[in-house]
Amino acid sequence: MAIKKSDLYSSLWASCDALRGGMDASQYKDYVLFMLFIKYVSDKYANSTDFRPAVVIPKGASFADMVNLKGQPDIGDKINTQIIQPLIEANSKLARSDFPDFNDPNKLGEGKEMVERLGNLIAVFQKPELDFSKNRADHDDILGDAYEYLMRHFAQDSGKSKGQFYTPSEVSRILAKVLGVGPDNTTAKTTAYDPTCGSGSLLLKVAAEAGKPITLEGQEKDVTTAGLARMNMILHDFPTANVLSGNTLTSPKFKDGEQLRTYDYVVANPPFSDKEWSTGLTLGDSGQQDPYQRFGWGVPPPKQGDYAYLMHIIRSMNSTGKAACILPHGVLFRGNAEAVIREKLVTSGILKGIIGLPANLFYGTGIPACVLVLDKENAQARKGVMMIDASKGFIKDGNKNKLREQDIHKIVDAFDKGEDLPGYARMVPLSEIAGDKNAYNLNLPRYIDSTEAEDIQDLQAHMTGGIPNRDLDALAAYWMVMPGLRNMLFKPLREGYAQLQQPIAEVKAAVLTHPEFVAFNDKATQTFADWQTRNLPALQGIQPGDKPKALGAQLAEDLLATFKPVPLVDAYDVYQHLMDYWADVMQDDVYLLVQDGWAAGSQLREVVQVKNKDNKLVWPEAHDFVVSKRRYKSDLIPRALLIARYYAAEQAALDAKHAELDAVSKSSLRLM
């Protein structure tokens, strides 16, 4: 029986992390991610009968051949020469710089230490549950998700300056969605580009939204990170993606003739405020010497490269191209040369929207960032800029902030609909941006007031008692749904003030039993029950080969739409409850059913001991049952449900015995 998806990722990370020793996470990630890569391509392509497989695995260079090297004194050198080098020679898109040196004593130790460390790392990927050749949830990113899971954890551990290779997936999804990419407007000829692609997550999110194979091209300055991107593309089943190394500003690799190639979609998360962006460039005072004509609107400041990347992106968009770029908030309001460029950006009509994100989302910096959405199609007819202040929608996740599913959905909904939402979103007319008051300053607080209402202290109420009527009026949304509730709870005290009609201890019961509240609660409960009934057939009909993510999205979208008309209930909060349950429990169940079918519910998985970093046998997880001294785990059906269904009488008898034992223990203590 397959292991749960979440357990697979967490155990993979725990095993690899335990073997890391004193090596920096930013270096160790290269070894771990290569192991995941070679295991996957070996399982998928080593015995391929395709005429032109996406990845060629030369004889003697598979993961199985690597396993045979365990314990050999020259294991590191042989991985380099017998595994990696033949793989590179057989696949033109792979380069030696993509992979780490497995014979580096400074990182892996010398002699026996290196042999043991590499042998243990290989053993992590020998686990039966990592047999990717049997993956039935094809194209549902099980492997890609594992890769991203590891990259997120390595980014967390790599420190501020070394985590820039990874853009949080939540942010990547926002960029892909606000571009409007979808199956209906993409074809095999659709192109997408990222000039600073890092590990490739932004491009992959665009491809995921397209729902079909499209052309992906990216450039990355760091050669090792470019290698991560190439492996990431293959693990996400986009082996034809083209990722090249080099400095995008000084030496762009994707050109048609001597001009920059243009694309349907461009996404980017360039280095914030790059102080060395102009090194190697000869532009002249007005930028006219740039061979790619990128700086017609002006030359950015020498120590602020944000607009340099933005203008490269604009030049890389075709005549109807769309783009989304992550930049620091400073681009919205900094003056001098940037103010001149910003004015020309606005007047061009290419700027379609601005999304302000929470601070501390990214691993490379803690400063707040924004997303600039660009669109050349109908730019001259554009009359306004859609602005969204989403800076307050997040949860804490360790020492970073993280966007929730509801935050992502709310941002995308507001952007797509272009509706005004007080304190959150506005379609701002260009005339307002260009007026004397703002003078092309795009700082979001100028246009959206997201400050919380001040808590007014009523001194008269504090001194003489009573509840100010204005405080009750502020709850008007509740009184509209339950108009009789206010009169039942409050009565006039004096002009402008009211008082409770019940003791405080009785208020909750009075509300819960009030006919209007009961009717409201019944209607909301029935709404949820209707959603359950409507979606039960989809859950009961899960079959091997289905797409778990598509099913999860279908359930969640229907739930959100179902609760949007319900008053007093935040439909996005309801949506988040389901998404949390999906992430914590439900997705594991669905992936197991897709992998093994419904018969998986009758199977138990044996829990076996493994060696820890001290080479001692330990139990890797808690068990549910013991049969003849062997431990088992029920992955699909919770232990409590099995006991309640088949062993209810035995559990009741056991509980009674425990109660007797507790009573005896308490009696003994009183006698002492």
Image (cartoon, grey):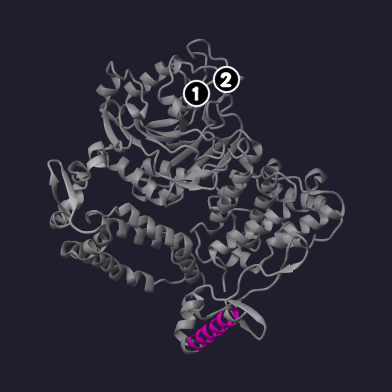
Question: Does residue 340 sit above or below 43 in this rendering?
Answer: above
- Tell me the kind of residue under disc 2: Ser
Q: Which residue is mark 1?
A: 308
Q: Residues within 10 Å of mark 2 (few under 14, many from 20)?
A: some
The circle on residue 430 is none
Q: Is residue 359 left or right of residue 103?
A: left
Range drawn in magenta: 651-669
What secondary structure is found at the residue carrying circle 1? Answer: helix
Q: Residue at x 25, y 38 (%)?
A: 458
Does label 1 or label 2 sit earlier along the sequence? 2
Q: Decide whether residue 664 is among the magenta residues.
A: yes
The one of 48 and 571 positioned closer to us in this rendering:
571
The answer to whether residue 127 is magenta is no
Residue at 52% across, 39% down: 362
Residue 278 badge: 2
Our reading of the magenta stretch's main secondary structure is: helix
Residue type at the position of mark 1: Ala
- Pick whichever, 532 or 342, lies toward us: 532
Residue under the point 74% across and 53% down? 83
Q: Mark 1 touching mark 2, by CB under 8 A?
A: yes
Q: Whole-Å distance between the Cαs marked 1 and 2?
A: 9 Å
